[in-house]
Amino acid sequence: MITVPRGLVLSLAAMFSAYHVVLGFYSLTQPRSPVPAILALVVYGVATVLSLWPASPIRMPLWLAYFNIAVCAMLPLLVGSQLDGSVDNGYATWYVAAVGTLMTITATRRRPWLAGVGTAALVVHTVFWAGPAALGSMGVIGSVVWVAVAVILARALAKAGRDARQYALAEQEATEWQAAQEAHLYERQVRLAQTIRLAAPMLRRIIDQGGELNDEQRQESRYLEAAVRDEIRGRKLLNDAVRDAVMSARRRGAIVTLLDEGSIDDIRGAELDSVLNTLASAIDATTADTIIARTAGDGSATAVTVVGLSSADAKLSALGQESPEPEVNLWLEIPRNPVLIARSQR
């Protein structure tokens, strides 16, 4: 979006305001007494400096807007009290353009309604002081038009700014969505390639043998099916070491379940390798019949929780005694911090 430097706008407004001050001093010989006009020039100068102060916020403070309205009501009274409204006073009515400029600044600084109040005060004074016909000859209509144009432009620029921010936000969201979709696509491609690598040899064997498999081949197919399920449900809980450890545990008869719920998606690189290698070592070391590895909840200092359960003693069931609950053979919480992982392994 094209923007105009604020310093340039302030400089132009200051030049217009200074021009009115020059006209006011130039015409001091026309009023019956120059004192009220000089006081009006001083008050107008103070209001202008405060309104154009470079460090002030874009939206004019409410107290300053009310002060400007008071100045706009004061200028016609001070200057007009020393002039004759029935004649052409020339540059002595400099306050008309000054009020228009000050209210234009007020409207530009996002106080449109208060700018309208100050302009209305000028119109009412002119009508009562010099008559309705003076609205055109004294330039009051021009000041009203300035303020109206400033209000319209300020609203248009504010709307354009809001639209630009909305478009930028929409573009950012679209970019993030596209990045997420590309990441999902890449992950699907990786999972698909891994699945094909695991299952393709057995699928070719099934095709070659017409589906007639011996017991050993059927059991191997079950292992491969579980490995494919791990690729879907385990996601980031898998690396080559974990895959090998899980397959070894299944071949000895253990039931292994891997559940990744997305809470370790922010762990990458060496930290993730440390967590997964610890998980693989824990699966290799346990003799539990059932192993469950699951990611911890969001905000937890633990990355993965590993539980190993051993079945009840079969001899007790054979003797008719009530079988006890499965025993916890393994309970391990793998922290997210590699330093804590190293300490836990000592």
Image (cartoon, rainbow, N blue to C red):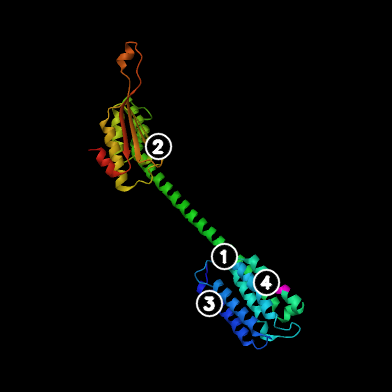
In the picture of the structure, the residue carrying the numbered disc 4 is: 119
Mark toward the start of the polypeptide (1 vs 3): 3
Give percent across and percent down for residue 72: 65, 73
In the picture of the structure, the residue carrying the numbered disc 3 is: 11
Mark toward the start of the polypeptide (1 vs 4): 1
* 1 and 4 marks in contact (CB < 8 Å): no
> Mark 1 against mark 3, which lies toward the viewer?
1
The residue segment tinted magenta is 120-124
Q: Nearer the viewer, residue 153 or 174?
A: 153
Say few, some or many: other residues with alpha carbon within 10 Å of mark 1 (under 14 / 14 to 19 / 20 or more): some
The C terminus - image quarter: top left
Residue type at tag 1: Pro
> Mark 3 against mark 4, which lies toward the viewer?
4
Task: Give me the C-alpha separation between circle 1 and circle 3.
Answer: 20 Å
Give percent across and percent down for residue 198: 34, 38
Residue type at tag 4: Thr
Task: Give me the C-alpha separation between circle 3 and circle 2.
Answer: 65 Å
In the picture of the structure, the residue carrying the numbered disc 2 is: 233
Q: In what element is the residue under mark 2?
A: helix
